[in-house]
Amino acid sequence: MKKKVWIIVLCLLLVGVFAVTCNIGLVGADSGFDSSYDSGSDSSDGGGLFYLIYLCFEYPPLGIAVLIVFSIIYFSNKKKGQKIIEESLNSKLQLLNTSIFPEEKRLEIEAFNLYKQIQFAWMNFDEETLRNCLTDEMYNMYLMQLDTLKVKHQKNIMYDIKYLGSSIKEKYEENGQETIVINMQVSCYDFIINTKTNKVVRGFSSKLNTYSYELTFVRTKENKQADICPQCGAPVEGNNSGVCEYCRSILISNNYTLVMSKKKMLAQK
C-alpha cells in the first residue's frame, strides 16, 4: 500500500517537472504585434517529450503512469481552450457608458472605448472600422499586418477586454488639432489561432494578460473643411464622405471624434 502511494506521489512530482521542462509560459499577442512572443506557442517543446519517452522505455510502469496523467491534463485543457476560442469568436463588442463617469474621466473612458473598438475590429479584420478609428499612418501599418495574418491563415483572438485604470499624461493643442496622451491599463485574453484548425499557434488561450499602454489620440476642435487632402494633395471641395476620393485617406480635419495616432506598450504580464 505504501509503495503505491509513493508511486502516485512520484508520478505527480514528475508531471510537475515535465511541465517546468516544457517551459509552459503565457504570452499575449495584442493588435499591432507590439507584445512579446518570446515564450512561443501553446505546444510543448521536444525536450519534455523526449524525457517522457525515455521514462516509458526505461521505467515502463512509471512512464506509462505519467503519460496517462499528462494525457488527461493535456486533452482536458485542449477542450477548455477550444470552448474559449468558440466563445470569443461569438462575442460582441460592448462599450462602457461614459455618462456614468465624472466629467474629468469621460475623455479617458471614451479613449478606452475607442481602444476596445480598434481591438475588436482588428480581431474581425474589419478594415472600415479601423479606417475610421486610426490615423492614416496607423491604419496602413495595421492593414499590412492584417494582410500578413491572412496569408498565414491566422487570427488574433482578443476578448474580455476590461478597463483597469488610466490617467491623462499630456494634453495640448496645435494648428486646431488637440492631442491627448493617456497612460492606460487593461486586461484581456489575447492569442493567435490558425483559422483552418482553430489551434492556438502563438500566445495562450487560458492566460489573462495585463497591459500598460501609452496611447496618443487626436481630434479636431473646429468645424473647418480642408481645401486639399493632407495625404495626397488632391482637392476635396464638396466631399462630404470624410474620405479622399483619390487616395482613400481619412480627412482628419473633418473628424470630430477621437482617433488613435500612436500606441506604445509600457509593460505586460
Image (cartoon, rainbow, N blue to C red):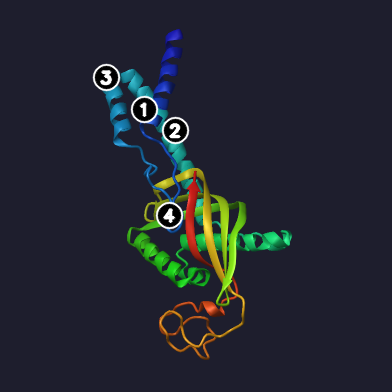
Residue 68 in picture, x, y percent from top left: 39, 27
User: Considering the numbered disc 4 on the image, is that residue within a helix, a strand or a loop?
Assistant: loop
206 or 140: nearer the viewer? 140
As shown in the figure, which amino acid type bears the numbered disc 1?
Leu
Residue 104 placement: quadrant: bottom right
Residue 178 in picture, x, y percent from top left: 58, 71
As shown in the figure, which amino acid type bears the numbered disc 2?
Ile
> Of all residues shown, which one is farthest toward the bottom?
238
Q: Are marks 1 and 3 in contact (CB under 8 Å)?
A: no
**Whole-number angstrom distance, CA of label 4 to CA of label 3:** 45 Å
Residue 21 placement: quadrant: top left
- The label number, if any, that marks residue 73 in the structure image: 2
As shown in the figure, which amino acid type bears the numbered disc 4?
Asp
**Residue 228 in the image: above or below residue 137:** below
**Residue 237 in the image: above or below residue 186:** below
Q: Residue at x 30, y 22 (%)?
A: 55
Q: Earlier in the sequence, mark 4 or mark 2?
A: 4
141 or 162: nearer the viewer? 141
Mark 2 crowd level (few <14, some 14–19, many ≥20, 10 Å Cα): few
Residue 249 in picture, x, y percent from top left: 45, 78
For mark 4, what is the residue?
Answer: 34
Mark 4 crowd level (few <14, some 14–19, many ≥20, 10 Å Cα): few
For mark 3, what is the residue?
Answer: 58
**Whole-number angstrom distance, CA of label 1 to CA of label 3:** 13 Å
Q: Earlier in the sequence, mark 1 or mark 3?
A: 3
**Whole-number angstrom distance, CA of label 2 to CA of label 3:** 23 Å
Mark 1 crowd level (few <14, some 14–19, many ≥20, 10 Å Cα): some
Residue 26 placement: quadrant: top left
User: Considering the numbered disc 3 on the image, is that residue within a helix, a strand or a loop?
Assistant: helix
**Whole-number angstrom distance, CA of label 1 to CA of label 4:** 37 Å
As shown in the figure, which amino acid type bears the numbered disc 3?
Glu
Left of 115 or right of it: where is 201? left
